[in-house]
Amino acid sequence: MNAPHSHTPRTVDIIIYPGFKALEAIGPLSVFEYANLHLQKQRKGVGYDVRFASTSVGPVQSDTQMMLHASKAVSTLALPDDAIVVGARNIQGALEHAWPVVDWIVAVHPHISRLAALCSGAFFLASAGVLEGKRATTHWSVAQMLQENFPTIEVDADAIFVRTGNLWTSAGVTAGIDLALAFVEEDFGRELALDVATDMVVYLKRPGGQSQFSTHLLSQKTVRPNIREIQNWILENLDQRLTSTALAQKAMMSVRNFARVFQQEVGQSSQEFIEASRLERAKQLLADVALPIKKIAALSGFTDDDHMRRVFQKRLGITPKLYRERFATTGIHEGDVTSPAVGKFE
């Protein structure tokens, strides 16, 4: 039997305050706890020492009936390795009541290995001035307000999470799980992150550059079941030749009626939906697997890599190569395009 491997756990403070979003605090906590369980099974000790911190020690009311106990008060004398500031539904009210958190960020941000803000928690970092001139993201519903209030920040309203140096920002709610998985992958490797994702029955890690509005998510909003079924079938067969005639036949509708109904239900033509879905698939592959661009173009359903490049230029203003360089996850690895925790792409 291998001898236990000892190391000093990474300290992580999850910063909460009255009105914080409960799921944004519990999601990352769960990721780190599952990581600890796997590390202990491997006789490697505990990887993370996670605490809830607030402006003072004691119970803190969330946006739900749940209260969490802050065992630590934010202080410049006891800095964690990593700090994660969660968001709130009423972020302006939260800032008024938790202004000491902003002062704390001003003082400590250069001295913390990773300082992250989830969802509207980005307003704490912005108010502290640490995001000036930097790229950041937040929940789509407050992205415009963040941009208007802090015009020097390059707000990316579409990304799942963004990393700029030691500063991390993420989209809303469950995107905090993606960010925490990225921490685990960076600290202990992709295999452990995959084990955690499998336990939690989530995707290993949506690339930070993935859109907050996936075509899978949008398809779920479609009212008519037959059109929703067609959307799902498209998403599962993106590498096939998908003509309007073939789709209409599958829906048992005339081409003209299918085109009219699809546009009415989805808000775009079937071919526009297909192109957007292929783009999303390609973005995921570029960010998370080390496959040649030509192979990714084929897997995503583009006629060739030049076709994919034109779509990227049209919709994103950058080439696939530049997209990969900008949005690659903490480690791009060779291998299959799917894995036990990833399954079909979203």
Image (spheres, grey):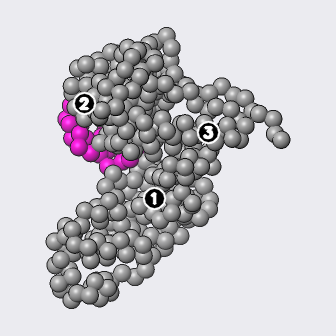
Query: Is residue 337 shown above or below 190?
Result: below
Task: Assign the C terminus to one quadrant of the image.
Answer: bottom left
Identity of the residue drawn at 57% across and 50% down: 194
Which of pointers 2 and 3 lies earlier in the amino acid sequence? 3
Query: Is residue 140 shown above or below 52?
Result: below
Q: Point out which mark residue 91 bears.
A: 2
Three-letter amino acid code of the residue under disc 2:
Ile
Task: Find out whether residue 105 is within the magenta segment.
Answer: no
Q: Point out which mark residue 38 bears.
A: none
Three-letter amino acid code of the residue under disc 1:
Gln
Find disc 3 in the rendering and name its residue.
Answer: 37
How many numbered marks have been drawn onto this rendered protein structure?
A: 3
Q: Residue 313: horizontal and vertical position, in percent?
A: 35, 61
Identity of the residue drawn at 39% across and 26% down: 68
For label 2, the crowd category at 10 Å Cα-Cα, with few meaning under 14, some 14 to 19 and many 20 or more, is some
Between the C-alphas of marks 1 and 3, the distance is: 29 Å
Between the C-alphas of marks 1 and 2, the distance is: 31 Å
Residue span colored magenta: 140-162
Find disc 1 in the rendering and name its residue.
Answer: 284
Q: Residue 242: horizontal and vertical position, in percent?
A: 36, 81
Element assignment for label 3: helix
- C-beta proximity under 8 Å, tags 2 and 3: no
Identity of the residue drawn at 41% across and 50% down: 209
